[in-house]
Image (cartoon, helix red, strand yellow):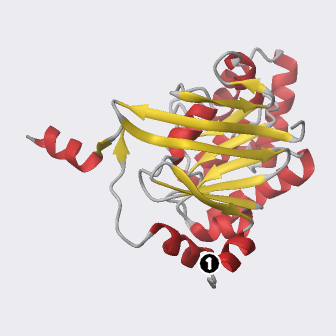
Amino acid sequence: MDNNIIEVKNLVKKFNGFIAVDNISFFVKKAEICAFLGPNGAGKTTTIKILTTLLKPTTGVIKVNGYNVISQSDNVRKSFGIVFQDQSLDDELTAFENMEFHGVLYHLPKKEAREKIEMLLKYVDLWERRNDLVKHFSGGMKRRLEIARGLLHNPKVLFLDEPTLGLDPQTRNLIWDYLKKLNLKEKITIFFTTHYIEEAEKIAGRVFIIDHGKIISQGRPEELKKTTKSASLEETFLKLTGRSIREEKVNGIDRMRLRRKFRH
């Protein structure tokens, strides 16, 4: 459908026989804000990595901005910005230099890049700190810079993998205020994963709940709560996924087992 910016059909991802993503299909419309919710090891980050061409699917058809993630990967990469779960800035460069380097990677004309850098750094309240080394920034400032960097090449989609993990509530609210304004003003699609269920309930127009590699429910937060007769999205989430603690998996292997192995 022309109105869909993301289309996923029958996506499967296996690691050495382990099924990390199990035949999921979904779509995201242009200018939507959508959230992926799921316990550790549910398949959230694996799906994001496939959508952003960092992993190849085992099977399935995946399109971003109308481009196939395998056969048209260059066009896909030009179509999105991404903020990774782990910090990916160069701490030994200034904020401006981090932005400028990103512009070079995307072959932006120098004059255009510098004008856009100024606009974005002002947008995230970092213009006055543009010449400061990133290693002196707080966690919240680094996140804001990563968001600005991800927007530099005018993407149609912004992927956010746990964008506010470890941040204080004030900084989390500030970042989401920026992103909601951006979505309204620029009509950019935002697709994010989060462990903060109240974030998904408050921010996302639609929520996908994924567990054991399958999407087990999807819809507007109010619809999901109504369907499960729940007072909150957190209650809905627990009813659908259970209350047991999950261990995160790395390429299908229990992370706790990996840690024990490397200790001995």
Q: Secondary structure at mark 1?
A: loop
Q: Quadrant of the N terminus?
A: top right
Residue at position x 69%, y 48% in the image = 191
37 lies left or right of 2: left
In front: 85, or 255?
255
Q: Label 1: few (<14), some or many (≥20) within 10 Å?
A: some
> Measured along the vertical axis of the image, is residue 237 above or below residue 118?
below
Residue at image mark 1 = 228
Q: Is residue 145 visible?
A: no
Q: Residue 163: x, y in percent? A: 59, 51
Q: How many marks?
A: 1
Type of amino acid at the residue the image marks with label 1 = Thr
Residue at position x 24%, y 50% in the image = 256
Q: Residue 35: x, y in percent? A: 66, 56
Q: Residue 16: x, y in percent? A: 33, 30
In front: 108, or 84?
84
> Measured along the vertical axis of the image, is residue 252 above or below residue 53?
below
Q: Quadrant of the C terminus?
A: top left
70 lies left or right of 75: left
Residue at position x 61%, y 37% in the image = 10
In front: 48, or 172?
48
Q: Is residue 165 visible?
A: yes
Q: Residue 42: x, y in percent? A: 46, 52
Q: Quadrant of residue 72?
A: top right
In front: 49, or 8?
8
> Measured along the vertical axis of the image, is residue 16 above or below residue 177?
above
